[in-house]
Amino acid sequence: MRRAVTLAAALAAVITLPAIAQDVKAPAATAQTAITDQEAKTWVGKHVYSSDGKKLGEVAAILRTADNKITELRADIGGFLGLGQHEISVPAARFYLKNDRVELDMTAAQAKELPKVAK
């Protein structure tokens, strides 16, 4: 009986280990991803993080084509309490939705080098 329990535990570990080990970043958005107006609105205000784990700011808008395919993300970064922040544009292929936050595939320094969006 003890051997059967040990064998069952070992099999369970072997079966579930690959699923636990996977941390695949699936793109949250690409040029082919289409989202509704409501889905786009739910992204606004989500925190934006760099690939090195630094919180940069918040999503300001999701821009889409006429057929609702995502083209870019606009994010307000930098500043404190809204002072000194600026808006950047991130192409769809450069960000992911991960655990209810947006993660860029660039470091904080790289994100801060993106050109500011003229308002």
Image (tube, rainbow, N blue to C red):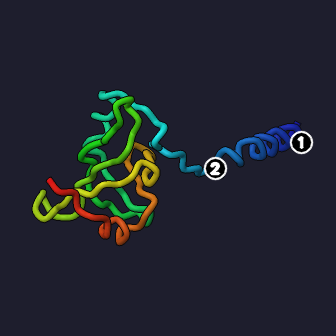
Which picture quadrant has residue 67?
A: top left
Residue at 32 percent of width and 60 percent of height: 55
Q: Is residue 47 above or below residue 115?
A: above
Question: Could you say where residue 76 lies in the image, as x and y percent from the top left?
Answer: 22, 55
Lower sequence index among marks 2 and 1: 1
Task: Provide the secondary structure element on which disc 1 rests.
Answer: helix
Question: Could you say where residue 57 lies in the image, as x and y percent from the top left?
Answer: 26, 56
In the picture, the quarter occupied by the N terminus is: top right
Q: Mark 2 points at which residue?
A: 22
- Left or right of 98, for residue 90: left
| Label 1 environment density (alpha carbons within 10 Å; few <14, some 14–19, many ≥20) | few
Please state which amino acid type lies under the numbered disc 2: Gln
Question: Could you say where residue 36 lies in the image, as x and y percent from the top left?
Answer: 35, 27
Q: Name the residue under label 1.
A: 3
Q: Is residue 6 above or below residue 67?
A: below
Question: Could you say where residue 49 lies in the image, as x and y percent from the top left?
Answer: 36, 57
Task: Provide the secondary structure element on which disc 2 rests.
Answer: loop
Please state which amino acid type lies under the numbered disc 1: Arg
Residue at 31 percent of width and 65 percent of height: 114
